Image (cartoon, rainbow, N blue to C red):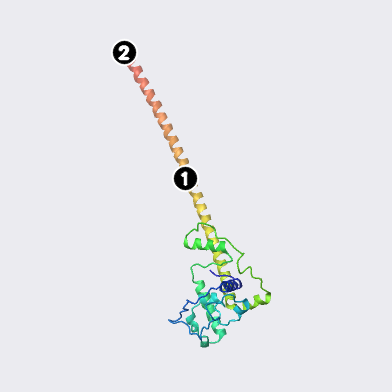
Amino acid sequence: MLRDPVSRYLSEWKHVQRGATWKTSLHMCDGRSPTQDELPTCYNGDDWAGVTLREFMDCPSNLANNRQVRMLADLSLVGCYNLSSMNESERGHILLTSAKSNLRNMAFFGLTEFQRKTQYLFERTFSLRFISAFTQINSTRASGVDISEDVRRRIEELNFLDVQLYDYAKELFLQRFQFTRQRERREERLKRREERRWLREQRAFLSKRKQEEGGDAEEEAEEATAGAGAATTEDYASQVVRW
């Protein structure tokens, strides 16, 4: 599941502000965890509870930045968390390309902002049905944060890779949705056409059978009449002899 980068970033900030941490995450890459120099912490103490949005944005090693790209990409391609292995521009390009490729090769992915379409694609992809319909909840903690345009632009700058990934994901998602809908409608049309053909054949068969049964009844009636006439003649002949 992917989410609008600004909303996702604000949601993670509120989550961390309430005391959430990822201290137990090893961030394993190429068989090892990053060193303290490669991935310095953004806070001292047990957690970052009460952090302001400004403080959250000002930490250069904050893993909230471009989280969706980083978690979808192959970090081995850029030396894991070693930022000195290449320049930032080259690193970003490689990560974004890798994330797009991995996303494209997934049988399914969804978007938080398109709950019903996400449900539809999941159900058609895996031939499963959810018990209840997905609900689009737009009133979230992130939506309740009132930010200025300057802050929004700053968040987009910090998440410039995620912004590009989300634009790509949205276009790909809607393409998959349209393709699946068109294929389903085409299959439904073929199914209805097959049903109509079957009904026509059934009606033709029953009509032919009725006609054949009607012909058999006429033959039986003729045979019965002929038989009755022969019986009358025999009786009359016997009476003549008797007389």
Residue 215, compared with residue 72, is above or below; it is: above
Q: Residue at x 50, y 61 (%)?
A: 123
Q: Residue at x 46, y 38 (%)?
A: 210
Q: Position of residue 74 (x, y in %)?
A: 48, 78
| Secondary structure under the numbered disc 2 in the rendered image | helix
| Residue situated in front as seen by the camera: 111 or 97 | 111
Q: Which residue is mark 1?
A: 202
- Residue 209: which quarter of the image? top left
| Quarter of the image where the C terminus is located | top left
Find residue 113 and name its label: none
| Residue situated in front as seen by the camera: 241 or 60 | 60
Q: Which residue is mark 2?
A: 242
Marks counted in the figure total 2
- Residue 171: which quarter of the image? bottom right
Name the N-terminal-most of marks 2 and 1.
Answer: 1
Amino acid, disc 2: Arg
Separation (CA) of disc 2 from disc 1:
60 Å
| Residue situated in front as seen by the camera: 78 or 17 | 17
Amino acid, disc 1: Gln
| Secondary structure under the numbered disc 1 in the rendered image | helix
Q: For the view shown, which residue lies furthest in the left direction?
A: 242
Residue 134, compared with residue 219, is above or below; it is: below
